[in-house]
């Protein structure tokens, strides 16, 4: 597994070394709206990608991405993939929910009828359309989607970040050298630690919460039945008193 990871890292680092980066060209509506911080701005990355750093915010988007800046700390991802490298209190809106990172890095990727969120090292919350809020741990990803027939938001199981896909996207937007990228990946692996162990602990926690929730539901149901039985008893006693105590 370790040898496979090293080979994967070498391939992406080599691709970074040989790739000639074109100057990012971005379509903006209104024209040159990015320069005006108080103006809403729609944009599309049409060449290598989109890189934006201003007012404490540092974000990147892959080629073909469409974004709408609604305010300094609120952007909407319409299409593509967005990497939030720096942006405390930054919110990304999507069609299926909003993602807010208080600190650290995260990714939001628009996919076919789903949105995938990857948490690198952020304090991250996902607010779904039905009002449910998900906490996404560092090193994990989850997809979200539309509402089911009961009006509940659909979302997947939390799982470790798909490292192969992540390295490919990350290397395509990384602005440092090959050595910088290798060093950043090494730090990432160190910070994430043993993801298999974390996944096992997370799964156990989810199962235990599910058991606790079921026990709570059973207790509520039991108390309801006891109240109903008590009410029936009172009604019977009242009826007997009216019939036989005349």
Image (cartoon, rainbow, N blue to C red):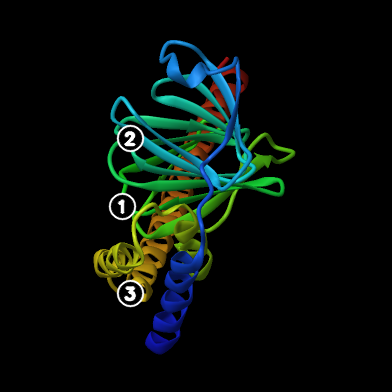
**Mark found first going from the N terminus, 3 or 2:** 2
Callout 1: SS:
loop
Q: Position of residue 183 (x, y in %)?
A: 27, 67
Q: Which residue occupies the extreme top position in the image?
A: 38
Q: Residues within 10 Å of mark 2 (few under 14, many from 20)?
A: many
In the depicted view, which residue is nearer to us: 203 or 58? 58
Q: Residues within 10 Å of mark 1 (few under 14, many from 20)?
A: some
Q: Is residue 138 above or below residue 71?
A: below
Answer whether residue 162 is visible to the viewer in this image: no
The residue indicated by pointer 1 is 121
Residue 8 is left or right of residue 28, and the answer is: left
Query: Which of the numbered marks, if any, corresponds to residue 208?
Result: none
Quadrant, the C terminus: top right
The residue indicated by pointer 3 is 197
- Contact flag, marks 2 and 1 (Cβ < 8 Å): no
| Label 3 vs label 2, nearer the camera | 2
Q: Position of residue 119 (x, y in %)?
A: 40, 52
Residue 228 is left or right of residue 10, and the answer is: right
**Mark found first going from the N terminus, 1 or 3:** 1
Measured in 3D between alpha carbons, the distance from the residue under mark 1 to the one under mark 3, in whole angstroms, is: 17 Å
In the depicted view, which residue is nearer to us: 5 or 174? 174
Measured in 3D between alpha carbons, the distance from the residue under mark 2 to the one under mark 1, in whole angstroms, is: 12 Å
Callout 3: SS:
helix
Callout 2: SS:
loop
Query: Which of the numbered marks, if any, corresponds to residue 87?
Result: 2
């Amino acid at each position: 597994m370790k040898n496979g990871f090293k080979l994967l890292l070498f391939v992406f680092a080599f691709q970074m070394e040989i790739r000639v980066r074109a100057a990012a060209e971005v379509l903006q509506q209104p024209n040159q709206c990015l320069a005006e911080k108080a103006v809403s701005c729609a944009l599309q990355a049409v060449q290598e990608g989109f890189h934006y750093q201003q007012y404490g915010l540092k974000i990147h988007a892959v080629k073909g991405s469409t974004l709408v800046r609604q305010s300094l700390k609120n952007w909407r991802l319409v299409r593509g993939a967005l990497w939030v490298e720096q942006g405390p209190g930054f919110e990304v809106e999507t069609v299926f929910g909003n993602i807010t990172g208080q600190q650290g890095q995260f990714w939001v990727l628009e996919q076919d009828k789903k949105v995938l969120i990857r948490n690198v090292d952020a304090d991250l919350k996902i607010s779904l359309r039905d009002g449910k809020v998900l906490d996404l741990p560092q090193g994990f990803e989850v997809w979200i989607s539309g509402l089911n027939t009961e009006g509940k938001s659909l979302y997947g199981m939390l799982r470790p970040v798909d490292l192969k896909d992540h390295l490919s996207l990350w290397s395509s937007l990384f602005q440092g050298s090959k050595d910088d990228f290798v060093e950043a990946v090494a730090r990432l692996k160190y910070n994430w630690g043993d993801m298999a162990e974390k996944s096992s602990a997370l799964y156990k926690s989810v199962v235990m919460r599910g058991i606790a929730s079921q026990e709570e539901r059973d207790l509520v149901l039991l108390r309801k039945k006891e109240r109903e039985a008590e009410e029936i008893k009172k009604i019977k006693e009242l009826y007997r008193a009216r019939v036989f105590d005349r």
